[in-house]
């Protein structure tokens, strides 16, 4: 059976071809919908358990509505988008190093601070930047949203 190549960080020369500050913004903007939908699904599920969620007769509001079906439709819409993105993430993760996977999860998808990411990687904060740049460039290339110098 052929041995699978382990992904490597991009070399500094490769990373220098990209406008990293702009690329970083583009990547974070691209994933803002994913982050928002992830939060939305949690909020909808949480609000379903609240006391006002059963107010289908309009007792506590001026509108008579069917909040259950509206919630269900919104959840389905959000989950379909999240599922399609998660399928792409499986393929993307095969191209990332183990450190880049942590950065992808904690920086791009969850927006944790560099200090938190450095702690997760057991590295000094100054040592994560080359890994972070490499991760962002790989993600941008994968989704065809890269920004060159």
Image: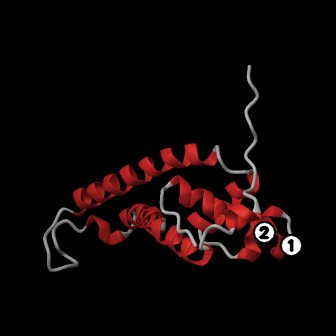
User: What quarter of the picture does the C terminus occupy?
Assistant: bottom right
Quadrant of residue 131 within the rendered picture: bottom right
**Mark 2: few, some, or many residues within 10 Å (few <14, many ≥20)?**
many
> Does the CB distance between marks 1 and 2 fall below 8 Å?
yes
Left or right of 71 on screen, residue 62: left
**Can you tell which mark lies on residue 124?**
1
What residue is shown at x 53% (from left), y 68% (from top)? 147
Q: How is the image coloured?
A: secondary structure
Where is residue 122? Give x, y as percent.
85, 64
| Residue displayed at 13% across by 70% down | 64
Q: Secondary structure at mark 2?
A: loop
Q: Quadrant of residue 108?
A: bottom right
Q: Position of residue 138 (x, y in %)?
A: 61, 57
Q: Point out which mark residue 128 bears.
A: 2
Image point (22%, 78%), residue name: 60
Residue 39 sits above or below residue 61 on the image: above
């Amino acid at each position: 059976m052929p041995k699978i190549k382990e992904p490597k960080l991009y070399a500094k020369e490769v990373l220098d071809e990209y406008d990293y500050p702009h690329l970083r913004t583009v990547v974070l903007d691209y994933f803002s919908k994913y982050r928002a939908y992830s939060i939305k699904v949690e909020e909808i599920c949480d609000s379903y358990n609240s006391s006002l969620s059963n107010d289908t007769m309009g007792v506590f509001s001026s509108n008579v509505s069917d909040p259950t079906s509206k919630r269900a439709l919104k959840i389905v819409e959000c989950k379909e988008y999240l599922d399609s993105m998660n399928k792409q993430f499986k393929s993307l993760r095969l191209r990332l190093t183990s450190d880049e996977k942590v950065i992808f999860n904690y920086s791009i998808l969850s927006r944790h601070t560099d200090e938190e990411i450095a702690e997760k990687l057991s590295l000094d904060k100054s040592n994560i930047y080359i890994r972070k740049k490499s991760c962002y460039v790989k993600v941008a290339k994968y989704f065809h949203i890269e920004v060159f110098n």
